[in-house]
Image: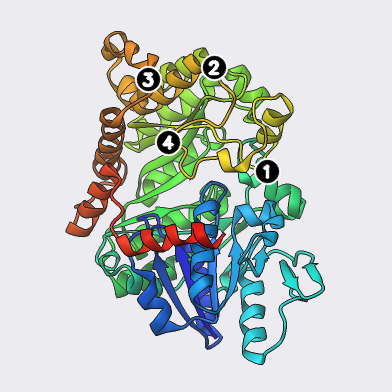
Amino acid sequence: MRTLFIVRNIENAEPLGLMQLAAVLVADGHQVRLAASRTTELAPVMDSFAPHLVGYTACTGLHRGLLRLNRALKARWRFLSLFGGPHPTFFPEMIAEDGVDAVCRGEGEGAMLDVARAIDAGRPLDGIPNLWVKTPDGIRRNPLRPLVADLDALPFPDRGVRYEADPPSRPYPVKSFLAARGCPFRCTYCFNDGYAALYGPAWNRTRVRSVGNLIAEIRSVRDASRLEFVQFRESIFPWDDAWLEEFADRYPREVGLPFYCHVRADLLDERRVGLLARAGCVSVNMGIECGDEDYRRRRLGRAMSNDQIRAACRMLKGRGIRILADNMLGLPGAGIEADWKTVRLNRECGVDYALAMIYQPYPGTALGEAARREGLFAGDLDRIESSYYRTSPLALAPAERCAVEALQKLFAVLVEAPWLERPLRPLLRRPPGLALTCLFRAWYAYCYTRRIIPHRMGRGELGELLRNLFGVFPVEANRELDQEAEGVA
């Protein structure tokens, strides 16, 4: 069975989920390719590879473009289409969309393997757990299968499909890994809350790979390609004391590369921060989210104080670990004053890069449902942006909308240079233009590549940076193909 996975863009964070599915399929004897619609002309790939199955992973917001692209491909080639990821997990009703043959809810390894074997054997897909499938008799809605319990039993993600789709990624010195799955916390704005509602307590029991298995993957990647910096991409890096102690002992000896990971302020103490530093951690991602402590506790489900956040930052910086802080603006019912409190808290913490995003009421989240009940969001999924750096879909007053969108672009600069607040405040009275957007993207790129993930930029990364800065769509043929879909819908 031949499977083509299509993503919009292959970013430096890497499509680890699809690479994991590819590994499972390849280990079972199937053929897999990966393509990014922004950088690869799809028609020659469809002609030469002739996939039996085309798979997409879709977050809410990105799903619209992928549906249009799928309809255009369906108009010219014959294949089965399968959508997975957060959007079909929480909205499997997208199976009713034209051109969608099946959707996969939740974890996909077992389902993809069953799909491949069914296609090879000429069997229908209608009985496969995790799938909703169109059949001649209507839509078949199958139950979920259990979560993957032993992550060590999975093959390592297939990076070969990524290198084939994006050759400059092989020498790119920064690569991503996952040490764990699941999350024990129920932040109201996060997909983890929806997954916990779907799977129950099993999702909240974090599943962690063994230290030996994780190190073996990193060493195999380093042996096969250039690797100078490691990114761990799970929601929270494993904090179990025994696991972290073993990791801090073995990783420097057996790998010895600097790394970045995600942490929570209320899980950090001097011992854990010391273990991270001893292991080689040079930077972390930590969610501050909102500077209004009461709102953060009451509405976001993050039971941590501003003092805890400040203390965590002091501990990290005391060990020389740099901090990328995640923040949200335009939160439902919070108001612009809460956003200014967030600016001030980031300043007090001395973070190395303060990243602000505009809140999006994603389906399957408690805060998204609350925004709908409170009349701040009509529930129209087409209003949710594919990027949380553009605009808010909430029903905000025009002045507040302008302030939120402009503050998002200026947020990091205002945290870094408080003296600019007075002269820049007038810019919050009108929507941000191209100049502010480019300023945001350029400062993000500088801080990411020089402070948080310090590395040398190659030509390929520089070109991608310039495309992102100026919004260039490099594959005109795919733009035309996408536009054709309007006539197919």
Residue under numbered circle 2: 397
Task: Tell me the residue that label 1 is attached to.
Answer: 193
Q: Quadrant of residue 274?
A: top left
Circle 1 sits in a helix, a strand or a loop, which is it?
helix
* Among the two numbered marks 1 and 4 on one chain, the one whose residue lies closer to the N terminus: 1
Along the polypeptide, which appears first: circle 2 or circle 4? Answer: 4
Name the mark nearer the viewer: 1 or 4: 4
Q: Mark 4 — residue?
A: 389
* Type of amino acid under label 3: Arg
The residues tagged by marks 2 and 4 sit, at their Cα atoms, a distance apart of 19 Å
Nearest-to-viewer mark from 3 and 2: 2
* 3D distance between C-alphas at marks 1 and 2: 29 Å
Which of the two marks, 2 or 4, is nearer to us in this view? 2
Residue density around tag 2, few if under 14, some if 14–19, many if 20 or more, within 10 Å: few
Q: CA distance from mark 4 to mark 3?
A: 21 Å
Given the image, on which type of amino acid does mark 4 rest?
A: Tyr
User: Could you tell which of marks 3 and 2 lies nearer the N-terminus?
Assistant: 3
Amino acid type, callout 1: Asp
Give neighbour class at mark 4: few <14, some 14-19, many 20+ (Cα, 10 Å). Answer: some
